Each structure stands twice: as C-alpha cells, then as structure tokens.
Amino acid sequence: MKKTNANQSLWSDPLFGLTIETSSPTTSSEHPHPLKPSKAQAASTPLPKTKLAVSAEEAAEIISVSRSTFDRLVKRGLIHPVKATRKPVFAITELQRFLDETAQSIDP
C-alpha cells in the first residue's frame, strides 16, 4: 500500500492489475472500508415500500382468482414460484408477466 497523502492511499493488486485509491477516515465514527457502508449508513437506507414477493394466497388475490385456480395455474407451469425459501413465494414481476402474456382484448 502506497501513501499519497495523509487521508488517501493507493492499493494495488499485481495479480489482477488493479489499483484502488482509498480515503482514510478522518474521525473514528467513519467506517474504514471504502466499499462497505457504515452501520449508520445502512440503517438509514430506506426499505422498499412494496413487497417484492408474496405468498400463494396473496398472489391469488392480486390476480383476482381463487386459490384453487391459482394452484392449477402453477401446476400447469403458467406461473413460476421462487423456491428460495421453504414455502414457495411469487415475485410481483412474475405475476405481472403472467397478466401481460395472457391479456387479450374483449370484443363487445
């Protein structure tokens, strides 16, 4: 690590040819790692106001079908669950994709 001035330093990786300029913290309350936010910064990051994924019951309600109809749509492969958890959840974007693909105009 090369020092450039009192508050900055250069870090270079000869294997990958990377050089990163970092700033040293000026107070003890600042986080020393340039890429990771401090705990105070992370706590102030707002969470999304809407859910990104919902349960099967909520998904059925969102697309206005019964739970049994929703289960049939999943079984037929028309709606795909996210299997990252023990219980499958359904991404809002997946429900929107399903509605967009199956939307058709109704002739009066």
Image (spheres, rainbow, N blue to C red):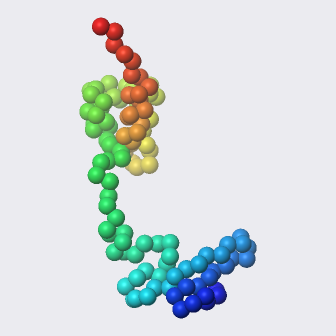
Q: Where residue 47 appears, x then y in whole percent?
A: 32, 58
| Residue with the most extreme bottom position | 6
Q: Residue at x 65, y 75 (%)?
A: 19
66 relative to 83 in the view: left or right: left
47 in relation to 106, above or below: below
83 relative to 46 in the view: left or right: right
Q: Is residue 75 visible?
A: no
Q: Where residue 104 appears, x then y in whole percent?
A: 39, 18
Q: Where residue 50 appears, x then y in whole percent?
A: 30, 48
21 in relation to 82, above or below: below
Where, by quadrant of the figure, is residue 59 drawn? top left
* Number of numbered tags placed on the structure image: 0
Q: Residue at x 30, y 7 (%)?
A: 108
Where, by quadrant of the figure, is residue 38 drawn? bottom left
Quarter the N terminus occupies: bottom right
Q: Is residue 82 visible?
A: yes
Q: Residue at x 43, y 32 (%)?
A: 97
101 in relation to 46, above or below: above
10 relative to 30 in the view: left or right: right
Q: Where residue 52 appears, x then y in whole percent?
A: 36, 47
| Residue with the most extreme top position | 108
Q: Residue at x 58, y 85 (%)?
A: 9
